[in-house]
Image (cartoon, rainbow, N blue to C red):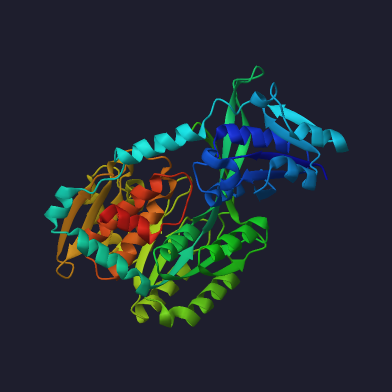
Amino acid sequence: MRKIFVSGHFNILHTGHIRLLQFAKELGDVLIVGIESDRIAGEAAHINEKFRLEGVKLNNLVDEVILVDEPIVDFVKRIKPDIIVKGKEHELIFNPEKAILDEYGGKLVFSSGETIFSSLELIKKEFELTQNNIGIKLPIEYLNRHQIKKINLAQILTKFANLEICVIGDLIIDEYISCQALGMSQEDPTIVISPIDSRKFVGGAGIVAAHAAGLGANVNFISVVGNDNIYEYAKDKLSEYGVDFHLEIDNNRPTTLKQRYRCANKTMLRVSHLHQNAISIELQDNIYNYLLKIIDKINVLVFSDFNYGCLPQTLVDKIISLANLHNVYLAADSQSSSQIGDIARFKKMNLITPTETEARISTRNKEDGLIIMADKLKNISDPKSILLKLGENGLLIHTSIDNHTEWQTDKIDALNPFPKDVSGAGDSLLITSAMATACGANIWESAILGSLAAAIQVGRVGNIPMQLNELKSQIL
């Protein structure tokens, strides 16, 4: 096994580092990265060694990350790598490692591509953005209109820890593959890219469950997976997020994997590995029987439906009947992007959160305005409240009061003017709003908390579980 070694400060893992690591990885079998400790790096360490170490560990190119708390030449003597890779800027200066390498036949190789990036400049830029308060802002007029006080919103969040939540739906693993654009092919009109990094995230109904756990609730997650490596990854991550799970294995399908190829913060291509056929009667029975065992302790049940076969209508109807018998709060989302769903098939929910497109699909209505169309959706599926997601135009709230005899409507504009990745906004909105309403918040309070969660989520790339302190920091 050829050992390749790279060392440095790695204050922020930027594109130059990724290119260097990719080059190093291609030279051998095992890539070892040494992170100079705060003591060794001195003033060059702008970020604590713990966070620098964790940042590099997240990169899939790296096989082993070691904190180096001794002179680098002494470390090289001990591990004896076959090749040391350094940036091109080191080629014309003295490199003390070379003498050690020469002693046992190792090589020193230089790679270009790192010097045009600066971790310190990236840190300064992030600090300036924070200081200028660019980002999420609460809609003061909306708060005043509904007599919502910030302290009341904060008090709602403290009740999340009392919730017992069950999320049921399609588990998805999202993989983000960062690429370098090489240009146009000379053979045909095709853009050529080169992958430089890959990161996986739990998505679909799995991230809804992870959000709930991150917000403090006790969470049970039920889904269907294939018998593959992606399933193993999902188990590890769900355990890490503190989610209890029951995953039925279907040997006739893969665990759903969605890959996004991205260049310069733009998604160029999506590739989905999935089956959309309904799960078998046997698996449906297994899910229902498991739910029977835990239904007594559940007070919130969330359907997170991506229409990949985990929630056939027969199973949905049985679960709704069971939940109603036990007075369980019900919420549902049924996504229709590359696939077709029907949010109206989830009857008598406390809360549904469709997009405008999903609502129009369910109502077969392309002409009417949003309020009329939302009211028609209410007549079909009879939810207590609808949060209609309008993308960059924000959120429409349509709700019943006075025992279904009157309906009220309002709107919240999108709260984050600088979104980076909108793919997880709906999931965070769904679970946060449902949890708030289940804790006694009115729909106006629940909608603003859900909108805040969505604003936080779109401000980062990839599905990362929401944390309670993130929401609190936007309120207080």
**Up-down: is 382 above or below 260?**
below
Between residues 326 and 425, which one lies in front from this camera angle?
425
* Residue 83 in the figure: left or right of residue 65: right
Q: Residue at x 59, y 68 (%)?
A: 248
Q: Can you give x and y, in whole percent of width and height, for residue 404 in the image?
A: 18, 67
Between residues 356 and 246, which one lies in front from this camera angle?
246
Q: Can you give x and y, in whole percent of width and height, for residue 283 in the image?
A: 58, 70
Between residues 55 and 367, which one lies in front from this camera angle?
55
Quadrant of the frame with the C terminus: bottom left
Q: Residue at x 19, y 63 (%)?
A: 400
**Up-down: is 102 above or below 75?**
above
Q: Residue at x 61, y 49 (%)?
A: 57
Quadrant of the frame with the N terminus: top right
Between residues 16 and 252, which one lies in front from this camera angle?
16
**Up-down: is 193 above or below 282?**
above
Q: Residue at x 80, y 33 (%)?
A: 99
Query: Based on the displayed image, in which of its 4 quarters is residue 380 positioned?
Result: bottom left
Seen from this angle, which residue lies furthest top?
186
Q: Tell me if I can see residue 230 in this picture.
A: yes
Query: Based on the displayed image, in which of its 4 quarters is residue 384 positioned?
Result: bottom left
